[in-house]
Image (cartoon, rainbow, N blue to C red):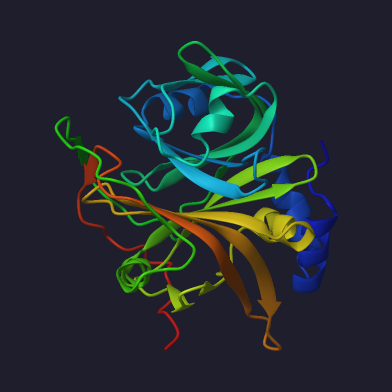
Amino acid sequence: METYHAGSRAVQDRAGVRDLADHVGQIIGQGIKPVAAAFLELQPLLILGAAAPATGRVWASPLTGPPGFVRATGPHQISVTGGTGATDPLTPALAQARDLPVGTVALDPRTRRRMRVDGRLRSTARGFAIEAERVFANCPKYIQRRESYETLTDREPVATRIGDQLTPTQAEFIAAADTFFLASVHEHGADASHRGGNPSFVQAVSPHELTWRDYPGNAMFLTLGNLATDPRAGLLFLDWDTGSTLQLTGEARTEFGADGERRVRFTLAEAVESPGALPLRWSAPEYSPANPEPAR
C-alpha cells in the first residue's frame, strides 16, 4: 500500500507540506515492533473505525477489556478478545467479518501516547483478529492527560437512544467534550484517529451539523485526505466519568480559509447514544498545553 493516496497528497499540497509529509511518513510500517506490542497489552480501551457493509455508513466504536484483551499475536497481527456492545452499529459486521477494512487507535491518557493499526479484520471464536497493513505512533499533541482509571464491574448499560438529529442534551455533551475519535475510509482501507482540545473546541451548530477547527498536526493529513475522496465519517464521543458514549455517522467536508485555517463541517445522518456503555471511569483531565483556545 502506498504511504499516501491522492486525497492526502491534495491536502498536503494545498497546505504546502508535501516534503514534511514524506519525512514524517517514514514512521508508518507494516510490522508490530516489541515496544508497540507492549503498549497495546497495557490498554483497557481500543477504538475501531469501519464502514458497516450492510448500510455503507462509517462508525467509530469503543472496545474495552482488562489489559491484555488487545495483544500482538504475530509481527503483523493483533487479536482482540470480546467485541463491541450488543447494540453497537458495527457489531453485526464484526461478528461475520472475513476481510473487513478497519482502522484502530489505542490511546493511553496516562502517558499521552497513541498508536494506530490499520488492516483487515476477521472474526474469531473469542473475538477478532486484524492483519496489520499500517502501524504507527502519533505525537502526544492535544491528548488530555488522565492519570488513572478504574473498572466498575457493577455498571449496567441503559437503553440505547437512536435518532437522526441531536438533542439539546447531546449538543451540550459535545460542547463539553475535550476528546473525540474520528473514523474515515478510503479506497483501500479505513482509519481511526483522535481529535482533542479544550472544551467547546467542537460545536453542534444545529441539530444536524457539527464543526471544529483542524489543528496543526503531523502534516500527513491521513484523515482529511480520506474525507477529500470519500466524505463518509463516524464520530465517537466518550464520557470519561460515566462511561456513556455518543456515536455519530454522516459526512464530513473540510473548508479551507483564506488565512490557511482549516475547518471540518460534519453533517449528521444518525446518532446512537448509549448511557453507561463502558465500564471505565477515568480521573479528571489535565488539558494538553498544545491546545489552542477555542474560537469565540
> Which residue shows up at 46% across the image and 68% down it?
165
| Residue 47 appears in the picture as rendered | yes
Residue 193 horizontal/vertical position (percent): 55, 50
* Of residues 127 and 136, the one drawn nearer to the viewer in this rendering: 127
Task: State which quadrant residue 134 falls in.
Answer: top right
Q: Residue furthest left?
A: 154
Residue 131 horizontal/vertical position (percent): 65, 22
Looking at the image, residue 147 lies above or below residue 1: below
Looking at the image, residue 79 lies above or below residue 53: above
Looking at the image, residue 163 lies above or below residue 96: below
83 with respect to 276 (left or right): right
User: Where the N terminus falls, by quadrant?
Assistant: top right
* Of residues 232 and 25, the one drawn nearer to the viewer in this rendering: 232
> Which residue shows up at 66% across the image and 24% down it?
31
Residue 224 horizontal/vertical position (percent): 68, 61
Task: State which quadrant residue 225 falls in.
Answer: bottom right
User: Where the C terminus falls, by quadrant?
Assistant: bottom left
> Which residue shows up at 54% across the image and 24% down it?
95
How many dots with numbers?
Answer: 0
| Residue 141 appears in the picture as rendered | no
Residue 295 horizontal/vertical position (percent): 45, 85
> Which residue shows up at 53% across the image and 20% down it?
128
